[in-house]
Image: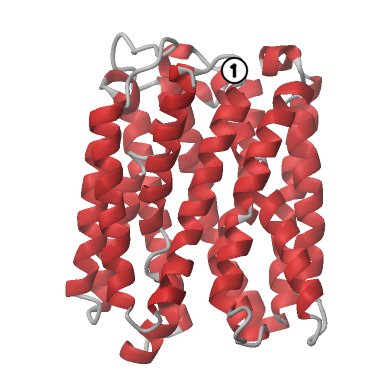
Amino acid sequence: MSKAWKMLLLVSFSELLCMTVWFSVSAVGPALKANYLMTDRQLAFLVMAVQLGFVLGTLFIAFTNLADVFNTRRVLSFSALLAAIANGMYLLWADKFEISLMLRLLVGFFLAGIYPPGMKIIAGWFKKGRGLAIGSMVGALSIGNALPHWIGVVMQEAWQTTILATSILTVVAAAIIFFLVEDGPHDVVARRFNFKYALTILRDRPIRLAYMGYLGHMWELYAMWAWVPVFFHAVLPDTAFLSPGMAAFWVVASGALGCVLYGAWADRVGRCVSTIVAMGISGVCCLAVGFVPPGYAGLLLALAVVWGITVVADSAQFSTAASELCDPQYTGTVLTLQTSLGFLLTMGSIRLVPLLQDYGGWGVAFASLAIGPVAGIWAMLSLRRHPAAVRMAQGNR
């Protein structure tokens, strides 16, 4: 195994472990509702607090160029340690909603120093095959986001163990990054702080189109990840063969397969073509999954798995496209700002789904997410026609 692939394996595994704290609380939502009489509205706010914290953290990193000026590995490992502490402290104040909300916001803030810097480390090791490499890392993130659902099923009502386990896994990840991961040969350290570069990015049309494609993708992705577990608990029977929680795990984790396969395919056919295809399929799933009639559990699960695979398959390709279109000195800043805007948007779609569900049912709620793929497809079609598109995927559009 080459050193680059060894680093990819270590970073991806570490990101997988770190991402377990993202949905650690929502994964044990049924237990929290039973023990603390927590409402779906309160659970939604706990999820959105992580999103808001992540947005604030990414904006801070983007405008300070933190991931470019300082050593990225140290930023990542230190952030992981702080995220683990904030996540574990939830055990002390689970019955205090306001304090819990603040702790989840801190978890999101520190996660901002994990996800985008991880992509920057991978970009430093790969120039050719970058789509596959970043796709593999994002695939690991999908499993990491799904893992709390599996832990929650295994631990049943011992929800405290789920929270504690995700914090321990994140501490392990911090140690791996700090002691075992190295900087890549393509890593470029910024010569100085440039507070205006984050604004300059938005005036660059090719990067702006890549951002718009990503925004369309993100409108759908995290709302799907956040509410599919709740949807399954509402419509699927709890059987010895497959519980709603385990179904949620497999659907979210299936995204890892899409990320890896799409990463390899996108390097050959281009970022634009691959993302358009993925958004087209996931958009159809948005429109269909909530309208599957009761009693058709097999059809529902099959459709949900296809959705789980395609909803995140293109995620890494938007990030890879942005990294190929920007000034290499500020790759970390570009990736961080991109994720910041995307996660800011997710707060709207995550909140919209339960409102529409109350009004028109799950079919209407999930169909609203198709707005994202439609907008994203338009943006990537526009980028494909732009001359700068040849800078992506070795000239493949």
- The residue at the far left in this view is 92
Q: Residue at x 71, y 61 (%)?
A: 305
Spot occupied by residue 277 in the image (x, y as percentages of width and height): 81, 41
Q: Residue at x 49, y 40 (%)?
A: 339
Q: Is residue 288 above or below residue 264?
A: below
Count of numbered labels shown in the rendering: 1
Q: Would you identify the image quadrant in which residue 293 lies?
A: bottom right
Is 368 situated left or right of 225 in this image?
Answer: right
97 or 150, which is in the foreground? 150
- The residue at the far front in this view is 1
Q: Residue at x 70, y 23 (%)?
A: 267
Spot occupied by residue 269 in the image (x, y as percentages of width and height): 79, 24
Q: Is residue 153 above or below residue 127?
A: below
The answer to whether one can see residue 183 in this image is yes
Quadrant containing the C terminus in the rendered view:
top right
118 or 208, which is in the foreground? 118
What kind of colouring is applied to the model shown? secondary structure
Q: Which residue is mark 1?
A: 325
Look at the numbered disc 1 and give the secondary structure of its residue: helix
Three-letter amino acid code at the position of disc 1: Leu
113 or 27, which is in the foreground? 27
Spot occupied by residue 288 in the image (x, y as percentages of width and height): 81, 67
Spot occupied by residue 163 in the image (x, y as percentages of width and height): 30, 67
Q: Residue at x 57, y 56 (%)?
A: 253
Q: Would you identify the image quadrant in which residue 26 lies?
A: bottom left
The answer to whether one can see residue 65 in this image is no
Dot 1, crowdedness within 10 Å: few (<14), some or many (≥20)?
some
Is 309 situated left or right of 179 in this image?
Answer: right
